[in-house]
Amino acid sequence: MMAARRISVLGATGSVGLATLDLIERAEPGRFEVVALSANRNAAGLAKLAIQHRARFVAIGDPAAAGDLRAALSAHPEIEIGIGAEAIVEAASREADWIMAAIVGAAGLKPTLEALRQGRALAFANKECLVCAGALFMREAAACGTRLLPVDSEHNAVFQVFDFERRAAIRAITLTASGGPFRTWSLERMRGARREDALAHPTWEMGAKITIDSATMMNKGLEIIEACWLFDLPPDRVEVVVHPQSIVHGMVEYADGSVLAQLSSPDMRTPIASALAWPQRMRAPVERLRLGELARLDFESPDDVRFPALRMAREVIAAGGPAPAVFNAANEIAVAAFLSRQIGFLDIAASVAEVLDRSQADTDMPQAVSSFDDVYAIDARARQLARDLIDKRATLRARTP
Ligand code: NDP
């Protein structure tokens, strides 16, 4: 019998984390063994998962949630508990064969880097890490001999049909985009879009941040950058097509005109299962694809005017330096402000553009990205610029009669 594959899940209580643990729960007994799990605030959810999966170590980021976690695990002294951001890094450092990086946002940078340094298999959902520090991450992965397994459905699709042995024959890759809830809305209507409108994604069930990113298509912008790093391609060879049914997830176009695509129902358990069992396959409890019942698959070009995020993403890759990390940080702050109803929907992309602009003339913005410390400094400074901008706008609005 094969030894159990030792698994850790960073961001266990989130949408991707839960889908990963659901697959582990359903797998044949003894195939997987859970080492460490992490969350930020959801103590009850983390404790439940730790007990269910007999995790050895759990880490919660927010110290305010420590009491609840300890209480929920009081009958389980065999489960070790860690508190604070450093404990999450420790969870990532516990020896495992396969680690899921599913923390949302740049908060995942340090733990994901620690997980990558184990030199085993790293399932990559936390795209913001590659956006902020793509060159550094890829260099570190190569140095540590880490196998990066893309989890984003589009990148996982491309990974499945990408001929790594014959890269020279690859002309371009295509990432599909559902178009989000505002695909057919006019710009004027989008101006009044509410939080609940933006959170109503037509095809995918995901965490709040990525759902808003899908509505602005910032998610696809982040994914273009992620794909450039994962597949070592320039941005002009990473194409995007809107495909509202979310059935075709990614495609690779070859020199002879062949286009190979991966198709599946829109359920994250397919790409996660593909990464979890890699290089084998495993059963996933997903709806079977019945193309006859679907009857049609539509494709259209993205609209750069209503969704400027795609153009911005291509500009920040071309600019290089701190720009991609600024882009990501400004977006994280803007999404949080939109979710707390501080700014309107169209203000998200507008404030990201303005922070990018301001960051160029900002003397406190580090310009070199030669270490992870540079990335943390850029991220912190960009967040400050974004918060200042949003607060000033809110004050102005409050003063306007
Ligand atoms: P969720 O918001 O559902 O979950 C995020 C997870 O990260 C939770 O476990 C949360 O803990 C934890 N977390 C949040 N903030 C911090 C922090 N500051 N420090 C440590 N942990 C933190 O996100 P998703 O699962 O939707 O997305 C996770 C990542 O995967 C994102 O990068 C996203 O872009 C990517 N992704 C997601 C897809 C999806 O279908 N959801 C598809 C493709 C990619 P707590 O619950 O305690 O707050």
Image: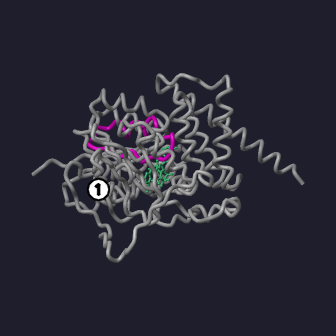
Identify the residue shown where x is 72% and y is 40%. Answer: 389
Q: Residue at x 27, y 41 (%)?
A: 169
Tell me if residue 250 comes above or below residue 289 in the rendering.
above
Q: Is 216 placed left or right of 387 in the picture? A: left
- How many marks on residues? 1
The residue range painted magenta reads 88-111
Q: Is residue 256 above or below residue 205?
A: above
Quarter occupied by the C terminus:
bottom right
Q: Residue at 35% of width from left, 77% of height from top?
A: 293
x and y percent of residue 4 in the render? 19, 49
Q: Secondary structure at mark 1?
A: helix
Asked if residue 178 shows in the view, the reply is yes
- At x 56% / y 57%, what residue is drawn? 215
In the image, farthest residue toward the front? 256
Query: Foreground: 101 or 298?
Result: 298
Query: Where residue 379 sits in the image (x, y, percent)?
Result: 57, 33
What kind of residue is marked 1? Answer: Ala
Q: Is residue 312 or residue 70 the one in the foreground?
A: 312
Q: State left or right for residue 137 relative to residue 306.
A: left
Residue that protrudes farthest toward the left in the picture? 1
Residue 72 seen in this snapshot: no
Is residue 285 inside the magenta stretch? no
Residue reaching furthest to the bottom:
293
Residue 172, picture quadrant: top left
Q: Is residue 97 magenta?
A: yes
Q: Is residue 349 left or right of residue 301?
A: right
Q: Nearer the viewer, residue 62 or 296?
A: 296
Question: Mark 1 = which residue?
Answer: 273
Location of residue 400 in the rendering, given as x and y in whole percent from the top left corner:
87, 51
